[in-house]
């Protein structure tokens, strides 16, 4: 037993915790236990003490023996922001990020647990990824751990642990996609550092609509979203040197769907069938679905065994200001306080001089970067303009699409004019070679489910010597917001 290390990886979700126990000895890591703890109707994170007692009983019943744990949070609990910072470090960097966080996040900083991933090796302006979650969530997890008699070492995003564990297989840069029922979690890494963490809503199945345009496979829709996310990086996939997408396929995508995903993103797709992709030699898990279900928890345990892989930790946050308890023995501390004040004055003078020197250097660099700043602002303006095509899709596009699909493709009935108001009430007029086609169009609009208050205003037969009849209809387009 000498030299063995055991640790728990606990991936926390809304209504369950995936628990994996790892044992490391002689350079070999194996999974000894893997179970799911589902919350009962009486237990939830809102009552962490009761939930912790239930978790302790569960771990004892399932023969888990590790006392230390790494807790993982789902991406839906996180807010991720990338900040461009000047070449500073230490306390100056933390101060800059804290000031920006006060403007970026709507919540008070006391209500948030915040950490960041920094590229300290860059000597110029560099991106820093800032990740925040509600402090209430972290406090609930620690209260639950205390009741369960577990010693938490860190709290980190689960998908970030999956991405970091991929570095063990030599993938310092790349893309990681974890697929589960109802959602997907996506991480982008560069040289082992997190650049993007994102949750993507995942449809449970295909829509029932019979039109070809509405029956695009879900994997194509997910691929389009991933490509859009990666394209927002300054250099796209080339910025992260991504040649490989690791997909933890927890929803049973077929090989053809995975190939479509790879072609859409222009990368090679790898779907691990065991935990060796994380550097774990063996496990008691069986089946790819079970392996994918427990992969985040296994990666969390692996990060606990190898702390150098831990890039984000809300437990030891570098941006959270921790309140210090007031001294109990004020008289005993009076002398210490006087000495501390004198030392503080000396420190402030020295720090002021150092900061003044640093500020002078930064002012000089800022003057030298004037052209770069103007170019960056131009890029920001362009990206902001392009983002509007995705964030502010006008409802009239959907109306035009549904109206077009209602018309037959044979060309015997067509539109001559279309008017739409802001509340999506419309008036369409046109002509047809047969009055029966006008009635078929009226029935198609009424039965589509996307139009309401459909009325035929008039239909006029063909004039003498002509073969075309005229018509006009009014409608209200539904579900356009």
Image: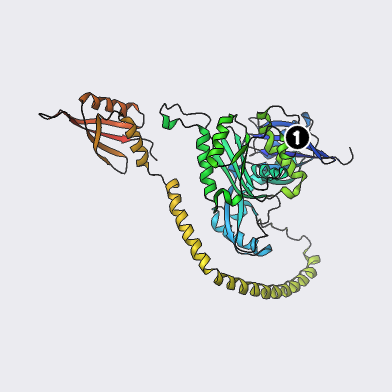
Q: Position of residue 73 (x, y in %)?
A: 65, 42
Q: Determine crowd level at label 1: few under 14, some 14-19, many 20+ residues with C-alpha closer than 10 A.
A: some
Q: Picture coordinates of residue 235 (x, y %)?
A: 55, 53
Q: Is residue 179 visible?
A: yes
Q: Name the image quarter holding residue 170.
A: top right
Give the residue furthest to the right. 2
Q: Residue 150: name its quadrant.
A: top right
**On the picture, is 345 further left or further right than 267?**
right
How many marks the image carries: the answer is 1
Q: Is residue 128 left or right of residue 64?
A: left
User: For residue 457, which quarter of the picture?
Assistant: top left
Against 330, is 159 above or below?
A: above
Q: State the image coordinates of residue 84 (x, y, percent, origin top left).
A: 57, 59
Residue placed most toward the observer, 436 or 152: 436
Q: Which residue is pictured at 23% across the width and 23% down the height?
A: 436
In the foreground, 291 or 420: 291
The C terminus: image quadrant: top left
Label 1 element class: helix
Q: Is residue 182 visible?
A: no
Image: 435 above or below 151? above
In the rendered view, tell whether residue 196 sits above or below residue 298.
below
Give the labeled residue for mark 1: 56
Q: Is residue 310 above or below residue 28?
A: below
In the rendered image, which quarter contains the N terminus? top right
């Amino acid at each position: 037993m000498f030299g063995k290390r055991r640790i728990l990886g606990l991936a926390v979700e809304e209504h369950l915790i995936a628990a994996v126990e790892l044992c490391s000895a002689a350079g070999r890591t194996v999974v000894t236990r893997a179970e799911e703890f589902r919350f009962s109707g009486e237990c939830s994170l809102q009552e962490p003490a009761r939930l912790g007692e239930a978790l302790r009983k569960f771990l004892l019943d399932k023969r888990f023996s590790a006392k230390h744990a790494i807790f993982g949070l789902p991406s839906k609990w996180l807010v991720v922001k990338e900040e461009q910072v000047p070449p500073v470090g230490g306390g100056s960097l933390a101060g800059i990020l804290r000031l920006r966080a006060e403007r970026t996040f709507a919540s008070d900083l006391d209500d948030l647990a915040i950490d960041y991933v920094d590229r300290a090796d860059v000597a110029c302006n560099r991106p820093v990824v800032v990740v925040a979650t509600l402090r209430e969530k972290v406090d609930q997890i620690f209260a639950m751990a205390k009741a369960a008699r577990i010693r938490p070492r860190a709290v980190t995003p689960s998908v970030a642990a999956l991405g970091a564990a991929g570095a063990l297989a030599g993938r310092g840069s790349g893309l990681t996609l974890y697929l589960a029922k109802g959602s997907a979690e996506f991480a982008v890494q560069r040289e082992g550092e997190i650049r993007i963490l994102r949750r993507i809503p995942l449809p449970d199945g295909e829509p029932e609509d019979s039109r070809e345009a509405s029956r695009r496979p879900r994997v194509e829709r997910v691929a389009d979203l991933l490509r859009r996310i990666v394209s927002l990086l300054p250099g796209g996939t080339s910025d992260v040197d991504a040649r490989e997408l690791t997909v933890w396929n927890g929803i049973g995508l077929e090989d053809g769907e995975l190939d479509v995903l790879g072609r859409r993103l222009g990368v090679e797709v790898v779907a691990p069938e065991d935990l060796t992709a994380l550097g774990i030699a063996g496990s008691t898990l069986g089946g790819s679905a079970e392996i994918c279900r427990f992969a985040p928890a296994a990666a969390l345990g692996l990060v606990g065994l190898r702390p150098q892989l831990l890039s984000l930790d809300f437990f030891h946050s570098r941006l959270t200001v921790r309140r210090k308890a007031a001294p109990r023995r004020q008289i005993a501390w009076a002398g210490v306080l006087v000495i501390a004040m004198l030392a503080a004055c000396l420190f402030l003078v020295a720090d002021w001089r150092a900061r003044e020197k640093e500020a002078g250097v930064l002012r000089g660099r800022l003057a030298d970067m004037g052209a770069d700043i103007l170019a960056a602002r131009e890029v920001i303006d362009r990206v902001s303009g392009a983002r509007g095509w995705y964030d502010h899709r006008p409802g009239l596009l959907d109306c035009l699409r549904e109206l077009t699909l209602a018309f037959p493709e044979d060309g015997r009935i067509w539109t001559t004019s279309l008017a739409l108001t802001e509340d999506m009430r419309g008036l369409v007029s046109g002509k047809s070679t047969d009055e029966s086609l006008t009635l078929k169009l009226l029935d198609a609009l009424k039965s589509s489910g996307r139009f309401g208050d459909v009325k035929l205003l008039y239909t006029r037969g063909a004039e003498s010597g002509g073969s075309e009849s005229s018509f006009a209809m009014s409608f209200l387009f539904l579900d356009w917001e």
